Amino acid sequence: MKAFLSIIRRDIKLATSSFGDMLTLVLFFIMIGVIVPIAIGPDKNLLASIAPGVIWIAAFLSSLLALDKMFRQDFDDGSLLAMRHASISFEAIVFAKLIAHWLTSILPLIIATPMLALMLNMNTQILIYTIISLLVGTPALISFGAVGAAITVSLRRGGLIAPVLILPLSLPILIFGVSAIKLGTGAGTQSAALLILGAISLITVAFTPFASALALKLTQE
Amino acid sequence: MPNKEAYSSQQLNVSKLSLIRSERLILSDVNFSAKSGSGIFLRGDNGVGKTTLLMAIAGYLHIGAGKITWGTDNNEEENSLIENLHFIAHQDAIKPTLSLKENLMFWCSLYGGAPEKVIDALKIVGLSHAIDFEAGLLSAGQKKRLSLARLLVANRALWLLDEPTSSLDKQGDELVVSLIDNHLERGGIAIIATHLDLNIKNAKTLILEKANQYGEIA
């Protein structure tokens, strides 16, 4: 457990020491929220109705942008190899890195969501639903991302391959994520969507550490 | 203050080992064994497969044929090897934005070592004056010393060292020798890939020869 926590602590420290990267990510996320109202026009009702989708698109794209960071540096400087003979299993290490990645790359986006809500004319109720939907759905998003990142970590210019690999897997997350926000279909459907989203997250978070660890082991051969 | 804790008696056996990477036969029919307290120098031309052999012993590679076993004579536990080894590779595994202490503290907790060993380890490798410096400020030789300090934060019986003296100065070479000597005296095992003639008392030499890479196993 101590080893597990020390990985999370180290990764958070490393992420905060390159604060610029974190800020870039949040700015990119907000930028999408700034561009959409300008491109669509000032129709408040239209903006409010597409807002949940826009926020999920922004979160999805930003998470793709951060993917490469997950294993790249540790792979390049040999840390990943040195982690192979740690006192905890390599799968547990990958899981710890997944948690740290969520805390440093996704949580800042969720914290910045109210700013996007302002740009997109969302009311408070929808904003709360949005944040809940993001909290429940993004673990699945980065879990698939972790597998993609692990597979492509040895490719020098693999920047866009991982997103293309995980795009089809991520579609259900987007579908249920957006429907978990939308109110129009009635409260029952909304909570059902949220539950399915939660189920997807739990399943993917449970199996991706094994898949990512296997992919990383194979690239190190 | 050198560590005096003794390791339990273990033996590493490598028999008829063949290694294949990217569909090329790198090494074939490698045989050796190392008992507690003995070291083995791996020698051979560049590209002959010294690093590959070390990685295979560490369990990172798929083994083509043969066997690597670890344990006491009558009780060979193959799986426990990975938690009983240190592997110092070419890459330093150092994070430039963390301090020396933070870097080493991380590996210490990851390898299940005692935190109070960290400062001692930095002293032994000669970096005690720079404990709170960012590791990015270190020279190549100092980075190597910091990597070597990983050996000291957790007690592990098998050391796999890949060119441990690269970019080190004369005193650095002597440091490596004294670290290995101390490790062997305590009953550890060290396998060292190097081109230098390190003066280690209890060490044999294994010369690796190129396998017939495109043909059959010789």
Image (tube, coloured by chain):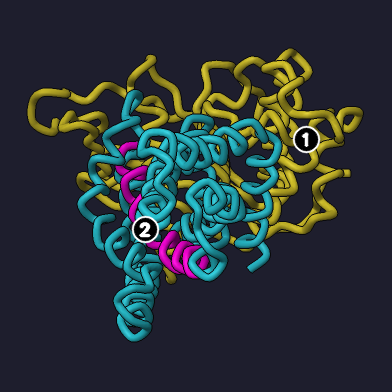
Chain colours: A cyan, B yellow
Q: Is residue B139 left or right of residue A189?
A: right
State the residue in front, A59 or B165: A59
State the residue in front, A132 or B21: A132
Q: Classify mark 2: residues with Cα within 10 Å, few (<14), some (14-19) or many (20+).
A: some
Q: Chain of mark 1?
A: B
User: Where is residue A33 shown, x and y percent of the image?
Assistant: 47, 42
Please tell me whether residue B180 is drawn above or below residue A92 in the rendered image: above
User: Where is residue B52 shown, x and y percent of the image?
Assistant: 36, 33
Which element is circle 2 on? Answer: helix
Instruction: State which quadrant residue A181 falls in.
Output: bottom left
- Magenta stretch, main secondary structure class: helix
Q: Classify mark 1: residues with Cα within 10 Å, few (<14), some (14-19) or many (20+).
A: many
Q: Please give the residue where the numbered disc 1 appears in the rendered image.
A: B100
Please tell me whether residue B61 is drawn above or below residue A93 in the rendered image: above
Q: Which mark is residue B154?
A: none
User: Residue at coordinates 35% horizontally, 24% vertically from top-left?
Assistant: A156
Q: Chain of mark 2?
A: A
Please tell me whether residue A194 is drawn above or below residue A221 in the rendered image: below
Q: Please give the residue where the numbered disc 2 appears in the rendered image.
A: A49
